[in-house]
Image: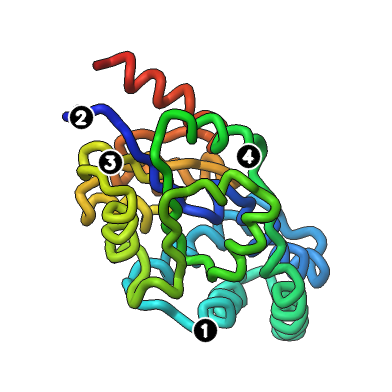
């Protein structure tokens, strides 16, 4: 049970407000499809999700995050040596072109704008500030946030709660009055360590994500960001 009415919302960025597929995942999928067209999308989604969880299981910022992720994706057992080499080159080239490609999730601007009328809001993300600067142009509602915490503002990343603790202070609310909205298991762990409630968004990973999320017992699970207003109405109705 939530002991106090919710007055503040802290959001993750990639996978919640912005499409993680367009900015991060697409280069890897496109590169693998180029070298092996018959490989199944569902298989790739699961491989990427598992690789991401392994990388985000520690608290330290990884400056070589993308090369490490590519290396993990190279373990796809359906690729031979030459296909792996082509995948390595193509994925790095494609990612360099897409890493600043911010594509809002469906209904993101409208959802955030509507929620702003009732809640204090903030962003806590491991994305770089230059990505968020671009996002502010495409999703103007971000300009009305009370606090924005990016990778540059922290020495440690989720699941370490450093960013969330800074976000909580920025909102100026009690922990019981805040929900964090994220899409990964590391978001759940960080929220639990920061002692705030968490809403897990399945997003573009859908049922692949649900299994991993449920194992960590988030307070709530919703399909997409646009479903958050209805969840908040339900929570308020239980008071």
Q: Which residue is mark 2?
A: 4
Give how far across and how far down residue 194 sits, in percent: 23, 54
Label 2: state its secondary structure: loop
Marks 4 and 1, how far apart at CA: 31 Å
Q: Quadrant of residue 62?
A: bottom left
| Numbered tag placed on residue 197 in the rendering | 3
Q: Nearer the viewer, residue 218 or 121?
A: 121
| Residue 86 seen from this side | yes
Marks 3 and 2, how far apart at CA: 11 Å
Which comes before the other along the chain, label 4 or label 1?
1
Q: Which residue is mark 1?
A: 64
Locate the N terminus by quadrant.
top left
Give how far across and how far down residue 47 sits, in percent: 56, 61
Give how far across and how far down residue 125 sits, in percent: 46, 60
Q: Is residue 226 left or right of residue 219?
A: right
- Is the residue marked by circle 3 packed among few (<14), some (14-19), or many (20+) residues within 10 Å? many
Identify the residue shown where x is 57% and y is 80%: 71
- Is the residue marked by circle 2 packed among few (<14), some (14-19), or many (20+) residues within 10 Å? few
Marks 3 and 4, how far apart at CA: 23 Å
Which comes before the other along the chain, label 3 or label 1?
1
């Amino acid at each position: 049970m939530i002991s106090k009415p919710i007055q503040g919302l802290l959001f993750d960025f990639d996978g919640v407000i912005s499409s993680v597929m367009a900015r991060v995942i697409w280069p890897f999928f496109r590169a693998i499809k180029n070298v092996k067209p018959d490989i199944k999308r569902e298989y790739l989604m699961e491989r990427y999700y598992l690789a991401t969880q392994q990388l985000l299981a520690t608290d330290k910022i990884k400056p070589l995050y993308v090369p490490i992720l590519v290396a993990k994706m190279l373990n796809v057992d359906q690729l031979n040596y030459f296909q792996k080499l082509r995948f390595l080159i193509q994925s790095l080239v494609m990612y360099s072109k897409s890493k600043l490609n911010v594509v809002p999730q469906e209904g993101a601007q409208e959802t955030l704008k509507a929620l702003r009328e009732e809640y204090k809001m903030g962003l806590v993300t491991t994305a770089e500030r230059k990505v968020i600067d671009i996002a502010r142009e495409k999703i103007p509602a971000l300009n009305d946030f009370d606090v924005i915490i990016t990778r540059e503002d922290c020495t440690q990343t989720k699941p370490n709660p450093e960013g969330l603790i800074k976000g909580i202070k920025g909102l100026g609310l009690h922990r019981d009055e805040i929900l964090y909205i994220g899409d990964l298991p590391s978001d759940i762990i960080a929220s639990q360590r920061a002692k705030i409630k968490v809403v897990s968004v399945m997003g573009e990973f859908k049922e692949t994500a649900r299994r991993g999320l449920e194992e960590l017992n988030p307070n709530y699970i919703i399909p997409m960001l646009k479903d958050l207003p209805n969840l908040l109405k339900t929570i308020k109705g239980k008071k």
